[in-house]
Amino acid sequence: MFPVPHQPRLKEGEQIMARMKFLCDTERCIECNACVTACKNENEVPWGVNRRRVVTINDGQPGERSLSVACMHCSDAPCAAVCPVDCFYTTDDGVVLHDKDICIGCGYCFYACPFGAPQFPSGAAFGSRGKMDKCTFCAGGPEEDNSAEERHKYGSNRLAEGKLPLCAEMCATKALLAGDGDVVSDIYRDRVTWRGASGLGSGWGIAYPDGDQTRRRGRDLDGKAAGGE
């Protein structure tokens, strides 16, 4: 038995906020870099800065896998833990953002992040590389939503418009999932379950018995992989 995490008691009318998360399905990623291009275009990311990148392991060998990587918006972000000026903050949706007006470009976050998410516009010594830049989950920054200043500093704020990050929306194979962590995990769990079931026998009727195949196939191939059905 696993311990059940404590859930805070909600007042009448209150709702639990979503915890926004990314997940890349390596069985589907084809290294097309559409997510990288979408991010750069949507957020007008400066040259030399890559908020998202595709990493390929065992390139050209058996077991080759590709993975789209960016800031994972950790629940207990190590970048925030080491920042000497506390420029990081977490939104109610669980998105980890930072204030460029406070950032001093020291590079501590760069060394603390296991995903290499913090980026700097210059290759000079830390302290003179400029303000740190990273994936914002298309949630902008501390300025007013969708203001010109927010757009200039942090790029697009699609979350304020009720949209999900464009990198996930543009993924042709639905490998990159983005949205409420519970919904993302349900989609991925369903995929893994039916991949395993397909190996129990041969033929479409074995993998997807009775009349359930249309619903299952639709969810796996055509569902909203950017954040749920």
Image: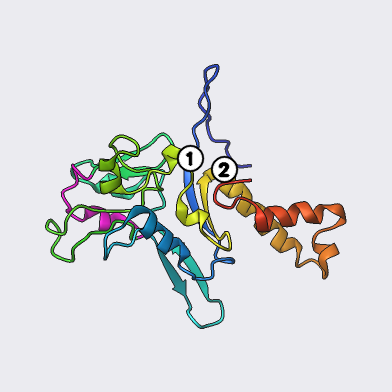
Q: Position of residue 198 (x, y in %)?
A: 76, 65
In magenta, the rendered stretch is 100-115
Give, as a three-letter code, the residue at label 1.
Answer: Arg
Q: Secondary structure at mark 2?
A: helix
Numbered disc 1: secondary structure: loop
In the rendered image, residue 165, in percent from the top left (x then y), is placed at: 45, 50
Residue at the limit of the structure toward the right, as seen here? 210
Q: CA distance from mark 2 to mark 1?
A: 8 Å
The disc labelled 2 sits on which kind of residue? Asp
Q: How was this image coloured?
A: rainbow
Q: Is residue 66 magenta?
A: no
- Residue where numbered disc 2 is placed: 182
Residue at the image point whose x is 75% and y is 61% from the top: 197
Position of the C terminus by quadrant: top right
- Of the numbered discs 2 and 1, the one sitting upstream in the chain is 1
Q: How many marks?
A: 2
Q: Which mark is residue 19?
A: 1
